[in-house]
Image (cartoon, rainbow, N blue to C red):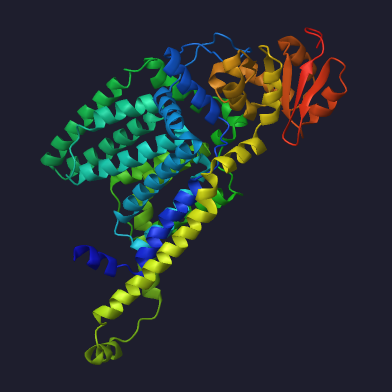
Amino acid sequence: MMAFRRWQDLDSGAVLRILVFVAIFSLAALPPVDPDLFWHLTNGQVILQSGWPHTDLYSFSAPGHAWVMHEWLADLAMALIVRAGGLPLLVALFAGLVTITAACLYWLLRRGGLHPTLAAILTMAGALAGSTAWGARPQVLNVTCFAVLACGLWLHREGKVPAWWVAPYLWVWANLHSGFLSGVILVGLFLAGEGVEAWRNHDARALRRLRGLALYGLGGLALAFVNPYGWDTVLFPLGTLFSPLIQNNIQEWASPDFHSLAGHLLEGILFVVLAGLGTGRVKARLADWLWTLAFLYLALSSQRHVPLFVLAAAPLIGRSAQALLAVGAEIVPRVSKAPAQRVALIATPIAPARSRAMALVNGAILVGVAAGMLGYRALPNLRPSQEAASIAAAYPVVGADALLREGRALRVLNYYDYGGYLIYRLWPSGSHVFIDGRVEVYGPGVFSDYLAVSYASPGWHDVVQRYAPDAIVLPTWHPLVGALSKDPNWRTLSADRVATVFVANVAGSQ
């Protein structure tokens, strides 16, 4: 009977809210073509076979350089998932993580009393604003961990969950991704804001609860050092966060592009907050302000942090949107109550049969639209044949096959985005790449040399001569393809619409 009543309560608003999450899952089920995906999978395989490496294994440009595999647990999990169910399972699970994060965002937006339908709309906007981080990659897991922690801290504030879980949670997160420091910041700002509020209100009970949270938070930070790389894992994010070379040349570390859809949605969210504050009706706790301001700074510095800002600011965003909704309700002319009351006296309540019929109609709409979303977007990207086609359209599949047929270990000077895929295909047979997404391994010297070649800057030929690669793999559209085609020291091994592969005619002559 209870299940029937819940089904009977399926109104149009509930249908919209459910469809928002179906849409987010469908949009997040992206083809497995993230440039870093394949070296993450190789990392997991290496751990399974020989344990944790501490020096670079994959390149000839930085052999033996110190390497902190700070996402080791995520890489291991990804490799095991692919071993169990292939890339389709990996894509589905990471789309599920994005959806869980969106559910946390919705929950946080509702904490301020925001109307459910408006919360669903803002959830979609917030999810898409941070969609540049989507894909089968540990960063998605990092954002989900952040979202769950934010919800957990809210529940702790309400006295619904204890504090002890924070310590093991931060420890596991630290082994999944070095972005756990964002969680430490979240806890620290929460303690600061709530501590000031409790002190002002002379709330001894809240202060005791916060002391417990502080102890467990410090315990989690201490446990974070218990990992295969020790303090290097904990300090790892600082090297990338403050690296001008990375900030200026890696897209996801650059500031948000406010000409893109994600950038426009971020602008819209900021407008909602500013306009809501302008009404003078927004009341928020100090911790909410600290979360919002701190992660807004990070988001404006790097689009990689936009999802963290949306989640951290969600309570304030929700209150701001609700304030605007209240102002709008006051502006719209009100209907006179007298006619409505007269109608209410003579109106017949909706019959249960009619209510059930409407619920069935809503259910049919829900099933039909959800099936259409999943069938149009998600399911095609979960088919192995479609995933293989997507990979072949993005990476040098034909070129890697040709290099493997050479039957020897090669030093491959490669396009940056191809590094992870070439590691996955060629490293097991003994070949090494020039560069991949692990920029911290290569340092500014190698990365600057790569940029000189990639941008065809004056002196690029000297860089090639200095590193003496056996093969070069570039996108077919790259300007150096024409120059290398005319160079007698190089011959074309393979070429298709995606990539062109050159091999040296005479070893050492290039």
Do we see residue 383 in this rendering? yes
Quadrant of image for the N terminus: bottom left
Give 371 or 154, whichever is nearer the viewer.
371
What is the total number of numbered labels drawn onto the structure image?
A: 0
Residue shown at the point (30%, 24%) measured from the top left: 221
Locate residue 485 relative to residue 10 in the image: left or right.
Answer: right
Quadrant of the snapshot with the C terminus: top right
In this picture, is 364 found above or below 77?
Answer: below
Quarter of the view holding residue 461: top right
218 lies above or below 187: above
| Residue 283, horizontal then vertical, whole percent | 30, 55
Query: Does residue 323 appear in this view?
Result: no
Residue positioned 57% across, 30% down in the render: 247
Residue 485's quadrant in the figure? top right
Say whether residue 175 is left or right of residue 31.
Answer: left
Q: Position of residue 107 (x, y in %)?
A: 32, 52
Image position, residue 439 (x, y; %): 57, 22
- Residue displayed at 13% across by 35% down: 208
Q: Tell me what residue is drawn at x 77 percent, y 17 percent.
A: 503
Q: Residue furthest left?
A: 204
* Nearer the observer, 148 or 4: 4
User: Measured from the top left, where is residue 21 in percent x and y?
Assistant: 41, 54
Q: Would you place residue 155 above or below residue 327 in this image?
A: above
Vertically, is 2 above or below 76?
A: below
